[in-house]
Amino acid sequence: MNDAPSEIDKSAIRAEVERLRLEHHDLESAIDALRALGVADQLQIQRLKKRKLLLRDRIAYLEDQLTPDIIA
């Protein structure tokens, strides 16, 4: 049975990865901006960092879906 994503699925996955990367970058910018203000709310920064980590994990998972399994 072939569980590999179709070309349409791959295209959708690539689009989602790109969207998540943009959100990840935006979170990085938001964290940097909060720190630069000097009135950094540590709880808010921690929440943003946690969201950023979740995005990174999701991106890695989706990219793994695009990589074909190599059976040794």
Image: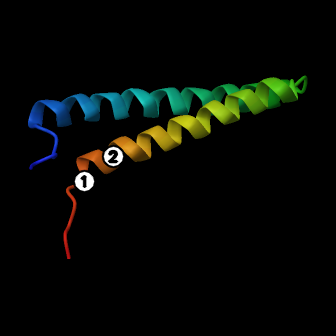
Q: Residue 71 in the image: x percent, y percent?
A: 19, 70
Which quadrant of the view contains residue 38? top right
Q: Is residue 20 left or right of residue 63?
A: right
71 up-or-down from 31: above or below? below
Label number found at residue 34: none
Q: Secondary structure at mark 2?
A: helix
Report x, y in % for residue 26: 56, 26
At a point 28% along the width and 28% down the height, the residue shown is: 15
Badge count: 2
Q: Is residue 61 left or right of residue 46?
A: left
Instruction: Find the residue positioned furthest to the right.
Output: 39
Q: Which residue is mark 2?
A: 63
Regarding mark 1 in the picture, which secondary structure is present there?
loop
Q: Which mark is residue 67?
A: 1
Q: Is residue 69 left or right of residue 17?
A: left
- The x, y position of residue 19, in whole percent, is 39, 26
Q: Amino acid at mark 2?
A: Glu
- Are discs 2 and 1 less than 8 Å apart at CB? yes
Q: Amino acid at mark 1?
A: Thr
Q: CA distance from mark 2 to mark 1?
A: 7 Å
Residue at 24%, 47% in the rendered image: 66
Looking at the picture, how far across and down is residue 7, in whole percent? 10, 36
